[in-house]
């Protein structure tokens, strides 16, 4: 009964989405207030219905209703309650339902926090989002019904993939999807503005906080996924340039470019059509990511060809959305009035350069991700494009962007004074150079690339601090959007420093140790004390004990595990990590070598990763910076001040 | 600078950036794309010598042997038609099992063994690496074709 209720709620939601996607847009075009007044209530009703559907599915998982195919395939009665609920979005169908739920949450948010916007604008924005919702709800209902019954019902379920039975995996998908889908708001604002024909500073000011909000979620979602891969996969890597990861990283790159371009459009009225294009691209890449992950093309192009219903549906939807919006763009963008003039050396041009670099880097990632798929689909052979490709393309493209980000905040709008900026940045430059040259010596090994990486990291942090001091000394106010920008830049710097240090100075060793044996690595002494069997809620595990000491003083007692889950019967490595501020000590258990259970030797992988935690620390700083920026008061000011501030910022120019 | 000059500079910078990016991409592709070969192809000497490539197939049952150091393993990868001995030092992935699919990346040594620097097996029991499925079905098809020839070429 409950699953049917959920199914019915989804069908109703589709009906409402159809209304929301057509009447308000038509009403806005024909200036019929009665029609565009429909947008807000429709969005709220849609949220209610989708929430009910999601609740029904979650209940089926919670109550172990194995007569639902989705539950039987992805859960088990012995699965702990928290993971049973998380299993709701562990499957293909469930995760799409989560996608739609996120979309409806964003629609609800737009309907609630848009009081200062003209009603016609809200009607268009919600209308476009309604159309996106139509696409995904039909996909869900016609190709991936999450409530499909299994008759007769199964005795017990096939369990959730053990890899997903993890706290980070519980919150990673909602975060990531919140980010992915959040770009639909920026997209809808862009399409609405194109439909309206009015692309101006107020449009940019409206869509800025929404874009930043989506970007925050995406940043945290990607960081969580990376952290999960780091401790759960047992290899100690934190980014694999895997197509699934790239699928989330590409919208992030374009989203970052979009945030910067929106800043110019809001402050100076320039780059309007470029900003709109980025908004369209950001959401298109979110859709492409969904297609890549959900259609099965990544596991095998041939699997996709043999069961093409889902893939074809998303592909058609993708073509419709991207093709439609680009056509609209081509038709309308030409009519956009040019913005205020600016010199070649100005903050505008630096922001433009940055967003172009981000776009080109994203294109390189896209190429590396899709090229093997194309070759395979065309039968031209099988290749794989691994991390070395991405590293050797991505790093050189991002280095100038980071150098620019260190200078940018100190260059004025319209016409920058290079001599003045250089004079202000001299201390930052000296500190960065000295740090980059001499810090490697403290680690005992100097390499040009290490030094360069450190230089980039110190430079962007130094530049941001300099900008802060200059602003304080000038007596101009410290807006939270300015502080947020600096904090996010510092986050980038921290991230770059951490990546450089880990890449240059990590130690990794695979060893074979018998109980009682020990090995010295990176100044630490690792003593293996053997393995014991332990029982978990739904698995059995061999738990090893490794005592880590340094010069005789105890550092940590690590307990890596090799688990076997009752249902799926596959071994799974559960690594043990000692989290330190300056380094992680990472141990994972391989397998038992030789016979004799009690005294058997085991293979172990030991890693010492200096400053690796700051990779995610940098991401958190970026997200906090985004939060500060999005909470700026001017985004919450009413209609009254809108025109006024647009002019004021034009005059004030360089202060933000 | 006049607006027109500015535009020229901006366009030149854009073109230069794209040229640099294209050069980077091409260069990286040349150096870092890894090709895949089935054991049959390797045995037919289609695989490059002195270059990293990937092989894939099933781990032959009973072929997994661990050397005295405890870390180095020998196993045989087969596509049911031909097989190739592989040697690897390090921890094997969780789902590495005899009789299951595997992909290994490395180089062909002068000893005729494939020296793997990386062994990949995916985290899903039902999952067959696409390369492996492809290699197996190709070997299967070739054997079918050969059996037709052996029995007198069909008609």
Image (spheres, helix red, strand yellow):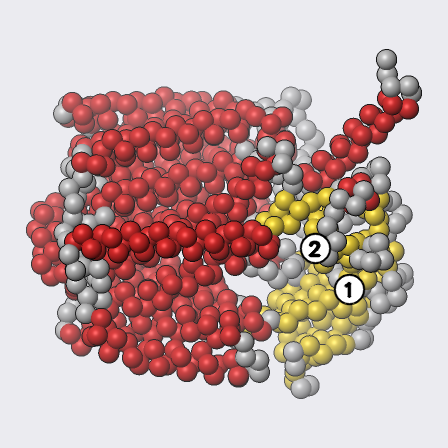
Q: Nearer the viewer, residue A103 or B106?
A: B106
Chain letter of disc 2 in the image: B
Circle 2 Cα neighbour tier, 10 Å, few/some/many (<14 / 14–19 / ≥20): few
On the question of residue A178 being in view, the answer is no
Residue at the disc numbered 2: B51
- Relative image position of residue B33 (x, y in whole percent): 61, 50
Residue A412 falls left or right of residue A359: left
- Relative image position of residue A51 (x, y in whole percent): 41, 34
Q: Nearer the viewer, residue A291 or A91?
A: A291
User: Disc 2, disc 1: CB below 8 Å?
Assistant: no
Secondary structure under the numbered disc 2 in the rendered image: loop
Q: Nearer the viewer, residue A513 or A413?
A: A413
Chain letter of disc 1 in the image: A
- Relative image position of residue B18 (x, y in whole percent): 39, 51
The relative height of residue B48 versus residue A605 in the rendered view (above or below) is above
Locate the C terminus of chain A by quadrant: bottom left
Residue at the disc numbered 1: A603
Kindly indicate whether the residues beneath marks 2 and 1 are on one polypeptide chain. Answer: no
How many numbered badges does the structure rendering display?
Answer: 2
Residue A56 falls left or right of residue A383: left
Circle 1 Cα neighbour tier, 10 Å, few/some/many (<14 / 14–19 / ≥20): many
The relative height of residue A186 versus residue A126 in the rendered view (above or below) is below
Q: Residue at x 53, y 55 (%)?
A: B27
Q: Nearer the viewer, residue A61 or A118?
A: A118
The relative height of residue A148 versus residue A346 in the rendered view (above or below) is above
Q: CA distance from mark 2 to mark 1?
A: 29 Å
């Amino acid at each position: 009964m409950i699953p049917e209720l959920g199914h019915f709620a989804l069908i109703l939601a589709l009906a409402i989405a159809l209304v929301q996607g057509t009447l308000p847009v038509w009403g806005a075009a024909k200036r019929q207030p009665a029609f565009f007044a429909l947008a807000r209530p429709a969005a709220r009703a849609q949220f209610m219905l989708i929430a009910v559907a999601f609740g029904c599915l979650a209940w089926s998982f919670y109550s172990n209703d194995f007569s639902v195919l989705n539950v039987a395939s992805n859960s088990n009665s012995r699965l702990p309650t928290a993971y049973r609920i998380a299993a709701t979005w562990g499957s293909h169908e469930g995760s799409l339902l989560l996608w739609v739920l996120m979309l409806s949450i964003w629609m609800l948010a737009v309907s609630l926090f848009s009081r200062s916007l003209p009603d016609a604008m809200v009607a268009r924005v919600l209308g476009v989002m309604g159309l996106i919702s139509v696409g995904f709800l039909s996909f869900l209902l016609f190709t991936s019904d999450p409530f499909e019954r299994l008759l007769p019902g199964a005795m017990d379920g096939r369990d959730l993939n053990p890899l997903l039975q993890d706290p980070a995996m519980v919150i990673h998908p909602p975060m990531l999807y919140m980010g992915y889908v959040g770009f639909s708001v920026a997209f809808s604002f862009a399409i609405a503005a194109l439909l309206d024909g009015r692309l101006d500073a107020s449009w940019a000011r409206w869509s800025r906080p929404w874009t930043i909000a989506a970007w925050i979620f995406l940043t945290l979602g990607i960081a969580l996924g990376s952290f999960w891969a780091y401790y759960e996969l047992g290899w100690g890597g934190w980014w694999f340039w895997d197509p699934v990861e790239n699928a989330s990283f590409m919208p992030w790159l374009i989203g970052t470019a979009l945030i910067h371009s929106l800043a110019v459009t809001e402050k100076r009225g320039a780059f309007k059509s470029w900003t709109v294009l980025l908004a369209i691209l950001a959401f298109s890449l979110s859709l492409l990511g969904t297609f890549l992950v959900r259609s099965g093309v990544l596991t095998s192009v041939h699997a996709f060809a043999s069961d093409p219903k889902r893939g074809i549906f998303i592909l058609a939807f993708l073509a419709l959305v991207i093709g439609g919006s680009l056509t609209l763009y081509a038709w309308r963008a030409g009519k956009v009035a040019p913005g205020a003039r600016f010199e070649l050396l100005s903050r505008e041009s630096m922001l433009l350069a940055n967003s172009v670099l981000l776009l080109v880097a994203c294109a390189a990632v896209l190429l590396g991700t899709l090229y093997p798929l194309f070759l395979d689909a065309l039968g031209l052979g099988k290749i794989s494009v691994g991390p070395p490709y991405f590293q050797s393309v991505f790093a050189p493209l991002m280095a100038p962007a980071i150098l620019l980000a260190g200078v940018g905040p100190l260059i004025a709008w319209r016409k920058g004074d290079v001599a003045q900026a250089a004079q202000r940045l001299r201390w930052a430059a000296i500190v960065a150079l000295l740090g980059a040259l001499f810090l490697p010596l403290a680690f005992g090994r100097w390499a040009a690339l290490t030094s360069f990486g450190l230089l980039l990291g110190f430079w962007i942090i130094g530049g941001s601090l300099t900008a802060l001091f200059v602003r304080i000394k000038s007596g101009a106010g410290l807006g939270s959007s300015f502080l947020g920008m600096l904090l996010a830049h510092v986050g980038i710097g921290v991230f770059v420093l951490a990546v450089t240090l880990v890449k240059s100075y990590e130690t990794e060793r695979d060893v074979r140790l018998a109980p009682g044996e020990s090995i010295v690595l990176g100044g630490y002494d690792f003593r293996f004390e053997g393995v014991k069997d332990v029982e978990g809620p739904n698995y059995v595990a061999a738990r090893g004990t490794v005592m880590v000491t340094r010069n005789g003083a105890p550092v940590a007692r690590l307990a890596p595990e090799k688990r076997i889950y009752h249902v799926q019967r596959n071994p799974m490595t559960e690594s043990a990590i000692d989290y330190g501020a300056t380094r992680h000590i990472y141990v994972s258990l391989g397998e038992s070598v030789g016979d004799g259970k009690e005294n058997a030797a085991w293979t172990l992988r030991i890693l010492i990763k200096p400053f690796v935690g700051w990779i995610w620390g940098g991401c958190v700083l970026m997200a906090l910076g985004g939060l500060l920026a999005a909470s700026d008061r001017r985004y919450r000011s009413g209609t009254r001040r809108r025109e006024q501030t647009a002019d004021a910022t034009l005059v004030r120019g360089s202060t933000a | 600078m006049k607006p027109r000059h500015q535009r020229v500079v901006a366009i030149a910078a854009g073109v230069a950036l794209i040229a640099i990016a294209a050069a980077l991409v091409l260069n990286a592709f040349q150096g870092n794309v890894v090709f895949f070969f089935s054991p049959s192809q390797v045995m037919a000497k289609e695989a490059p010598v002195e270059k990293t490539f990937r092989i894939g197939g099933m781990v032959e049952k009973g072929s997994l042997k661990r050397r005295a150091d405890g870390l180095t393993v020998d196993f045989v990868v087969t596509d049911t038609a031909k097989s190739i001995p592989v040697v690897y030092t390090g921890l094997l992935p969780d789902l590495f099992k005899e009789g299951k699919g595997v992909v290994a990346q490395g180089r062909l040594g002068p000893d005729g063994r494939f020296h793997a620097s990386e062994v990949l097996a995916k985290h899903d029991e039902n999952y067959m690496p696409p390369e492996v499925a492809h290699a197996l079905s190709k070997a299967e098809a070739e054997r079918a074709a050969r059996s037709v020839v052996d029995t007198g070429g069909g008609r």
